[in-house]
Image: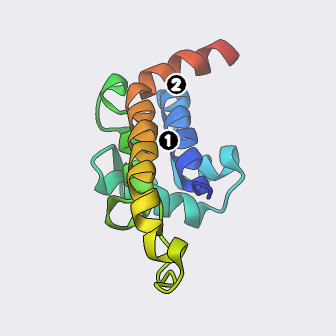
Amino acid sequence: MQISSRFTLAIHIFACIDTFGREHKITSDFLAGSTNVNPVIIRNILGQLKNAGLINVARGTGGSTVAKPLGAISFLDIYHAVECVEDGKLFHFHENPNADCPVGRNIHHILDSKLIRIQHAMEKELTAITLEDLKKDTEKYL
């Protein structure tokens, strides 16, 4: 299992908006230059972040800005905005385990609660990190 690059791209986008937003219009082309990703992909992520209320995007070449204080946006907020997690579940269970097999028949009983615990632990960690933390770390390297 691997979380898609949309998550790290979204965080990269926030770092650029915060770092360069006072001097440059933060457009999809500008962000594509920093991320080295096609501007269409950047626009899709910007749309997801906008729909989640995390950024403001001005039409045309108006640029993007952060919609909330950095300390009010957690990594979990970003994750929820850009990752397509079906029914809020991080793990997708294989569809039809063999009911005639003792393992297949019981695999949900064996794994479900463990997978929920893992997901909750990940979400707790993502909640603990905010964009304010990202800003502090970014400033160390500029």
Residue found 43% across the figure and 64% down from its top? 84
Q: Quadrant of the C terminus?
A: top right
User: Is residue 64 visible in this depiction of the protein?
Assistant: no
Residue situated in front as seen by the camera: 102 or 29: 102
- The crowd level at tag 2 (other Cα within 10 Å; few <14, some 14-19, many 20+) is some
Q: Which residue is mark 1?
A: 25
Q: Horizontal placement of 33 versus 103: left or right?
A: right
Query: Is residue 5 or residue 50 the one in the foreground?
Result: 5
Against 38, residue 120 (above or below) is above
| Image point (43%, 46%), residue name | 119
Percent position of residue 90, x then y: 44, 57
Would you identify the image quadrant in which residue 40 lies? bottom right
Give, as a three-letter code, the residue at label 1. Answer: Lys
> Residue sitting at 44 percent across and 26 percent down?
129
Q: How is the image coloured?
A: rainbow
Of discs 1 and 2, which sits in the foreground? 2
Residue at image coords 28%, 32%: 68
